Image (tube, coloured by chain):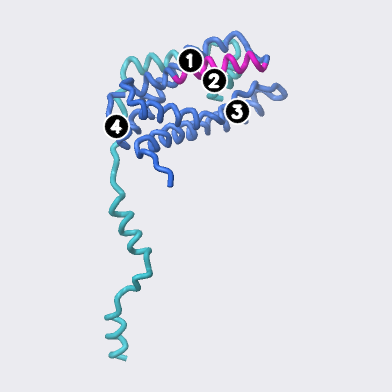
Chain colours: A blue, B cyan
Amino acid sequence: MATVHRRELLAYLVGAGVAGTLLVAPYTLRVVADEIFLPGRGISLVPVVLLPIVWGLWNLLRVRRRLRVGAGTWGAMLGLLAAAGVNAYLRAAGAWFQAAALLVVFLPLLYWLLWRIVVGPLNRALGVDGDGG
Amino acid sequence: MRTRALIRRGTPASPHDLWPRLRARLAEEDDVVRVAVPPLGWREAAAVAAVLGIAALVPDPLAFLAASGVL
């Protein structure tokens, strides 16, 4: 039987659960945008389906390493990595556009908010960590 | 009839019926957690304003939001 620390498992589930819940937005809004605002024009697809796994592993990593960095800051670092990854992905796919460079500001701020207001409090409530977030 | 009723009343619940025990155990272990959202101050307000401002001011907001994973 495989064993895993309860805190680490909970950390993964919190990150994956929050990201999975938030994915409702892109999955529904994109359909609306495609049908109403952009008929006939394709939007470059970024693999957002991986977000729950990435968020879960990122939260698990913070708990496993016992990092003394707040949840918001940790989330912002993930946002920075995600922005770099998306830019690299768009460039490799030949779909890069100039405004995509602003993602390195946009995503860290957005992730900071989400991790500070949602992931951090859930971590504390479930005993995953006890820092100030 | 009276004898049968007395016998039925005296019969304990079957030990193989685990549902009552499971329900009791789940109810016993179900505790309450308190989710304390941090107070929202000027830093959070500034971050929200920046996020909305960037999304509104980029030349192609839909493509930008799609690339960010928000859309």
Q: Is residue A22 above or below residue B59?
A: below
Q: Secondary structure at mark 3?
A: helix
In this picture, which residue range is highlighted in magenta?
A78-93
Decide which of A118, B62 is in the foreground and name it: A118
| The N terminus of chain B - image quarter | bottom left
What amino acid is labelled 2 in the image?
Ser
Q: Which residue is mark 4?
A: B36
In the rendered structure, the answer to whether residue B34 lies left or right of residue B17 reads left
- Looking at marks 1 and 3 on the same chain, the residue that comes earlier in the sequence is marked by 3
Where is residue A13 shown, x and y percent of the image? 42, 37
Q: Which numbered disc covers residue B68?
A: 2
What is the magenta segment's predominant secondary structure? helix
* Contact between labelled residues 2 and 4, with CB atoms less than 8 Å apart: no
Q: Which residue is mark 1?
A: A106
Q: Is residue A35 above or below residue A104?
A: below
| The C terminus of chain B - image quarter | top right
Mark closer to the observer (1, 3): 1
Q: CA distance from mark 1 to mark 3?
A: 19 Å
- Looking at marks 4 and 2 on the same chain, the residue that comes earlier in the sequence is marked by 4
What amino acid is labelled 4 in the image?
Ala
Where is residue A108 shown, x and y percent of the image? 45, 16
Which chain is indicated by disc 2? B
Which chain is indicated by disc 3? A
Q: Secondary structure at mark 1?
A: helix
Q: Which residue is mark 3?
A: A30
Q: CA distance from mark 4 to mark 1?
A: 26 Å
Identified at 61% across, 18% down, the residue is A89
Which chain is indicated by disc 1? A
Q: Secondary structure at mark 4?
A: loop
